[in-house]
Image: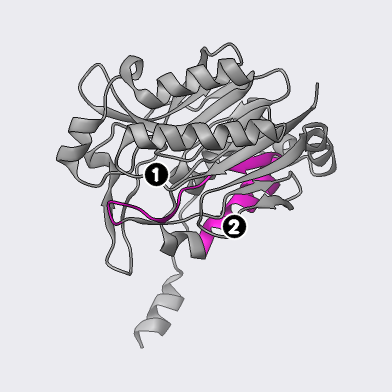
Amino acid sequence: MNMFKAAAIQMRSGTDPQRNAADLEKLVRDAASQGATYIQTPEMTGAIVRDREARNSLFTTQDRDPIVAASARLAAELGIFLHIGSTAILRADGKLANRALLFSPDGKIVTTYDKIHMFDVDLDNGESWRESAAYEPGREGVVADLPFAKLGFAICYDLRFPQLFRAEALAGADVLTVPAAFTRQTGEAHWHVLLRARAIENGAFVIAAAQGGLHEDGRETYGHSLIVDPWGRVLAEAAHDEPAIIVAEIDTALSAAARRKIPNLKNAREFGVSQAGRPEAALRGAAS
C-alpha cells in the first residue's frame, strides 16, 4: 500500500495543556472526517510556556500527560496514525524531553523521538532562546516502518541539520516529518526553502505541521504548515498563522521515482576535507 491521505494540523497552543488537548481533539476529528489516516500536530502541542517555573508545574511524565492520553484515545476511536509533533515530557531523571509520539490505530505508541538539536540562538530582533536550559537533547534519529510509508522523525530546529534527514533517508524513510514552532522572523526567512530543500535532496515527501500566531506567553510563531512532494512541489499549505488543517494525498511510489531520476543517495561518496594554506607570495602581496 503506497498511498495514503495525510493531514497537518496548525495550532496556536496556549499555556493550559487541558485546553490544548480539547483544541487538539476538535482538529483531529475534523482531519479524520476529511479522510486523513495519518495526522500530524505541531511541536509543543501540549503547551507553549516560556517561564521555567510554570513549565515545571505543568509538565508531567508520559503516563500522566493529558495530550498522550487524549491522543491514544483518539487514534483508537478514529482508526488513525496520530503523530503528536512534540510535547514536553518529564523524564525519569527529572529532566524534560521535547518528545514526538506516534500512535497507531489501536491507540498504542508505535515509537517516540526526542528532539536532538536544541534551539540556542540570539536573533537580530532581540529574541534570545536557550532550549538546552530546559530540555535534554535526544541522541538518535528514528524511522518508523508503517503500512503505507517509512516515516522519518525530526522537530523544528532539526530542520537546519541536513545530516539527520540524510541518515533517515538512507535508512529507508520516504516521508520526512518536521513538526515545528518556528519563530516569525526565522520562518519568514527560511521555512519554505529549507523544507523544500530537505524534500529535494532526499527524494522524500516532507510533512510539517506548525504553530502559528501570537501565543499566551508572548511568543510569536510563523504558521504556514506545509506538505511537500519529493520533487520540491508544495502540495498543501496553510498560507497564514491561524489554526487550520491541510490535507494531501501521498503516493510513496513518487519518492522511489524521484530517487531513480536523481540517485544522489546512491551516488554519495566518502571524503575528507583538507586545509590549504595561502601561498607566501599572496601573503606578501596582501601585506604590501
Sequence-wise, which precedes: disc 1 or disc 2? 1
Residue positioned 73% across, 23% down in the render: 148
Q: Position of residue 269 (x, y in %)?
A: 66, 38
* x then y, percent, for residue 180: 47, 45
Give the residue at x 34% y 39%.
47
- In-image side of 265 versus 213 (left or right): right
Q: Say which amino acid is labelled 2.
A: His
Residue 258 position in % (x across, y down): 80, 41
Image point (60%, 59%), residue name: 239
Query: Is residue 272 visible to us here?
Result: no
- Residue 192 is marked as 2
Q: Is residue 1 left or right of residue 177?
A: right
> Quick one: quadrant of the C terminus?
bottom left
Using the image as rendered, state which of residue 203 and residue 284 is in the foreground: 203
What are the residue bounds of the magenta stretch?
A: 189-218
Q: Nearer the viewer, residue 121 or 288?
A: 121
Against 285, is 154 above or below?
A: above
Query: Nearer the viewer's eye, disc 1 or disc 2?
Result: 1
Mark drawn on residue 13:
1
Label at residue 125: none
**Is the residue under label 2 in contact with that under label 1 (CB below 8 Å)?**
no
Residue 213: x and y, percent?
Answer: 43, 57
Rendered position, 221 above or below 250: below
Badge 2 element = helix
Q: Is residue 191 in view from this perspective?
A: yes
Distance between the alpha carbons at the discs numbered 1 and 2: 22 Å
